[in-house]
Image (cartoon, coloured by chain):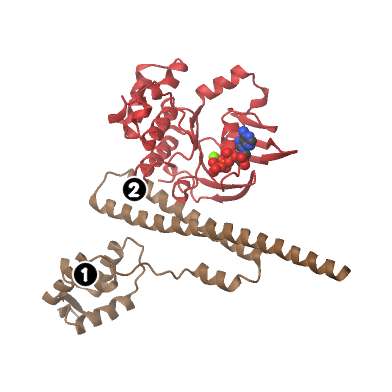
Chain colours: A brown, B red
Amino acid sequence: MSVKHGLLGLLARKPQNGYELKNSFDEIAGGFWDVNFGQIYSTIDRLLKDGLITTSSEGGEGVERRVYQITQKGIQEFKDWLDKPSAKVRPLRDEVFVKLAFMYPFDKEAILQLLAEQRQLYLAKMAELTRKKYLLSRQSGSRDMLMTDLLLDAALFHAEADVKWLEHCEAKLSEFESIQREEALENDEIGFDQYEG
Amino acid sequence: MANKVEVKDVFKTYKRGKTGFHALNGISLSIKEGEFLAVMGPSGSGKSTLLHLIGALDKPTSGDVLIDGTFLSSLSDDALSQIRREKVGFIFQQFNLLPTLTARENILLPLKIAGKSSRENEKYANEIIEAVGLTNFSDHLPEEMSGGQMQRVGIARALAIRPSIILADEPTGNLDSKTSEEILKLLKDCQEKFKQTIIMVTHDAKAAAYGDRIIRLKDGQVDEEVEVYGANLISNL
Ligand SMILES: Nc1ncnc2c1ncn2[C@@H]1O[C@H](COP(=O)(O)OP(=O)(O)OP(=O)(O)O)[C@@H](O)[C@H]1O
Ligand SMILES: [Mg+2]
């Protein structure tokens, strides 16, 4: 979901002001997507410029509020987006990966420690999400709850992949290090023999 | 809360060549009554060995295991088999089903052996059969079932006697993610509703996340421990 299409979808339901849009966005994203008012308003500006929404002011005593409505063009844009699968694959920009790249030749212990701590952090986070899921499952089912459950699942599946990848890194780095050490030892021995001879 | 299970400086040593090999290497561990412990760790790290010793299926080379404060080493073979029958529900990595019995008969067998085939217990067994999604397969023989279905028979069989300790070795290893979730929820329900103590071995982080505590074995020892915030759910509501 992009902020742009999120806002279009919300406005397709009913006209709203910026404050209401921020709240409905948070609700529909189930707390998994942090958007601030700045992002909401800059997106609104772009949507106005592109003619996807229009605005009118809602008079109050002293307070004036801008209410936004979706246009025909906006509805069309939203429908086109809704029916198409996402072309973008999740970008691989894992912070841990960047750290690894910088740490690697330097300190094996520190790297393994970082990987283990990161893995433990993910596991603790997963346990927290699982708790939410379990509590949710004990209430009677509704469509909204199913959506929340599926969002929690998405977070869990991604975290699981991260944990697997971290374990994988640990195993491979440990193996690689021990091979290097053996090779270094062999080279040392040869050097030593030559020196002796 | 009291310790349900204690593992005290346990070694399990197998002969390998000239020297011994420590599948468990001086491991110590306490599991509280009503706790859900998840055990992770690489293949060969001693997870199944640990479960077998806790379930009194095998004996440590040295060290001891306590269940409800009783040293297992102090018990006769008869007393040990009584513990296995009445206190422990074992979900194995291999299913260990009797090939000539139907799913339902396999599930009810431990109740029969323990002499507990009451109407109430059979009613509970039926609820379990339904909860693991086996209602339509209860008359099938093991050879007429898929791996995942046999796994679920194994799970139902372990739960039907309402054991105070559930030992599960990769209980969701053969199941798709939706069925896995149902099984894990069922285990969590067992803990929440009946205060059953659960020790579950798993490679799967999503399954381990159902635990109150997650430990990781490495070379026969506890290598890491992740404590989960706010352990008991219901009392937090
Ligand atoms: N009966 C036995 N005789 C000799 N060695 C054994 C025996 N049982 C287990 N082992 C060895 O003890 C070690 C631990 O085995 P165990 O089955 O506990 O591993 P595990 O952690 O459960 O692995 P996995 O995740 O693959 O199930 C392994 O190296 C295994 O080869
Ligand atoms: Mg095993």
Q: Is residue A113 visible?
A: no
The answer to which image quadrant residue A137 occupies is top left
Q: Residue at x 16, y 82 (%)?
A: A51
Q: Residue furthest right?
A: A196
Q: Please tell me the numbered disc located at residue A60.
A: none
CA distance for labels 1 and 2? 30 Å
The spot of residue A189 in percent (x, y) is 80, 64
Q: Which quadrant of the figure shows ligand 1? A: top right
Mark 2 Cα-neighbour bin, 10 Å: few <14, some 14–19, many ≥20: some
Mark 1 Cα-neighbour bin, 10 Å: few <14, some 14–19, many ≥20: few
Q: Nearer the viewer, residue A111 or B69?
A: A111
| Of the image marks 1 and 2, the number of the one nearer the N terminus | 1
The answer to which image quadrant residue B136 occupies is top left
Report which residue position mark 1 lands on.
A81
Q: Residue furthest left?
A: A72
- Kindly identify which chain the residue marked by label 1 belongs to: A
Q: Residue furthest bottom?
A: A49
- A21 relative position to B21: left or right: left
Q: Residue at x 86, y 71 (%)?
A: A195
Using the image, determine if residue A76 lies above or below residue B50: below
Q: Residue furthest top?
A: B115
The answer to which image quadrant residue A150 occupies is bottom left
- B126 relative position to A66: left or right: right
Report which residue position mark 2 lands on.
A136
Using the image, determine if residue B120 lies above or below residue B21: above
The spot of residue A83 in percent (x, y) is 19, 65
What residue type is disc 1 on? Trp
Q: Secondary structure under badge 2?
A: helix
The spot of residue B168 in percent (x, y) is 49, 36
Q: Nearer the viewer, residue A184 or B107?
A: A184
Q: Nearer the viewer, residue B188 or A183?
A: A183
Q: Secondary structure under badge 1?
A: helix
